[in-house]
Image (cartoon, rainbow, N blue to C red):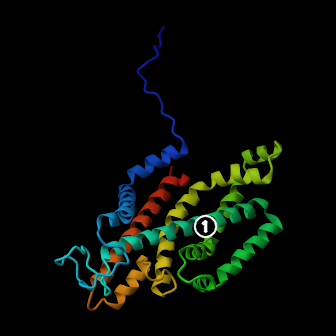
Amino acid sequence: MTEIVANDATPAVVSRGFWGDAWRRLRRNRASMVAAMIIVLITLLAFLGPEFSPHAFDAIDWDHMAVPPGGPNDHWLGTDRLGRDLYVRTLHGVQISLQIGLLATLVSLLIGVSWGATAGYLGGRIDELMMRFVDVLYALPYIFIVIILSTMFDRGNIYVLFIAIGAVGWLTMARIVRGQTLSIKRKEFIEAALASGVGTPSILARHIVPNVIGPVIIYATLTIPQMILFESFLSFLGLGVQEPEASLGSLINEGAQEMESAVWMLLVPASFLVTLLTCFNFLGDGLRDALDPRDR
């Protein structure tokens, strides 16, 4: 008779949850991790870098106007036509652009997730009316709505600006969340919650929204660069951040007017904007690969 002896040296199977597996997959994506580190470095530089310069972002140096980078002075990236330090001013612009991009994305997510989850879960005529309202807003020119909202209030107000951008940026998110909710609401755990007497608000908050958070995170990461680019476009048109404040868009607008004689005024903020947009897109692609259950 053959005796089977259990081998105590057999390695134990390590159990990983969804988020642990997603983090492991994201770490293997080198492009996304490098992009995330660059975003963190630029963010730290934007908020801490001005402290190492003797100049304020709106201070005028009458002795050094339109000085190129590397000149015999302490303006490391040169100055603009008014003698303002381009290093500090660009980092201040990165601060404003990041804040507007993040806050506008947050507003967009709060409205889009709430609207889409409610419409998808309730269904019927309510779903029909809510989504037709979204279709009507889709038919209107996006830039036209933002221009109206931004001109109804104080021009150049940062808070009004990110609310105006975020208030019309939730439409795609609402459709994404609605589609996910339609596929989730017939699952067994939703029926069990209904059978146990859980109310609709609790089901939405505790069961529906947590199960659509994966696509929400992916879309949020891809929405941030869209919001930054859109804010830059508004500032380029003169509808965004106003003097003496600065965003990347307003700095690029100023640099474009001087590109023939002072090209550094355009290249410095444009380099930061392109780097941020590229890194956020790489990070969003990595999160999509890590959180997509079809790839597991």
Q: Is residue 175 left or right of residue 30?
A: right
Q: Nearer the viewer, residue 21 or 62?
A: 62
What residue type is disc 1 on? Val
- Residue 198 locus on image (x, y percent): 80, 46
Q: Which residue is depicted at the point 52% across and 46% down? A: 19
Q: In which quadrant of the rendered view does residue 169 lie?
A: bottom right
- Residue 67 locus on image (x, y percent): 23, 83
Q: Which residue is depicted at the point 43% across and 18% down? A: 7
Q: Nearer the viewer, residue 2 or 55?
A: 55
The relative height of residue 70 versus residue 20 in the rendered view (above or below) is below
Most extreme residue toward the top, as rendered?
Answer: 1
Q: In which quadrant of the rendered view does residue 71 lie?
A: bottom left
Most extreme residue toward the left, as rendered?
Answer: 72
Q: Which residue is depicted at the point 46% across and 28% down? A: 12
Q: Which residue is mark 1?
A: 107
Q: Which residue is depicted at the point 40% across and 68% down? A: 276
Q: Secondary structure at mark 1?
A: helix
- Residue 256 locus on image (x, y percent): 36, 88
**Label 1 Cα neighbours within 10 Å, binned few <14 / some 14-19 / many ≥20:** some
Q: Nearer the viewer, residue 281 or 56?
A: 56
Marker count (numbered):
1
Q: Nearer the viewer, residue 11 or 84?
A: 84
- Residue 267 locus on image (x, y percent): 30, 80
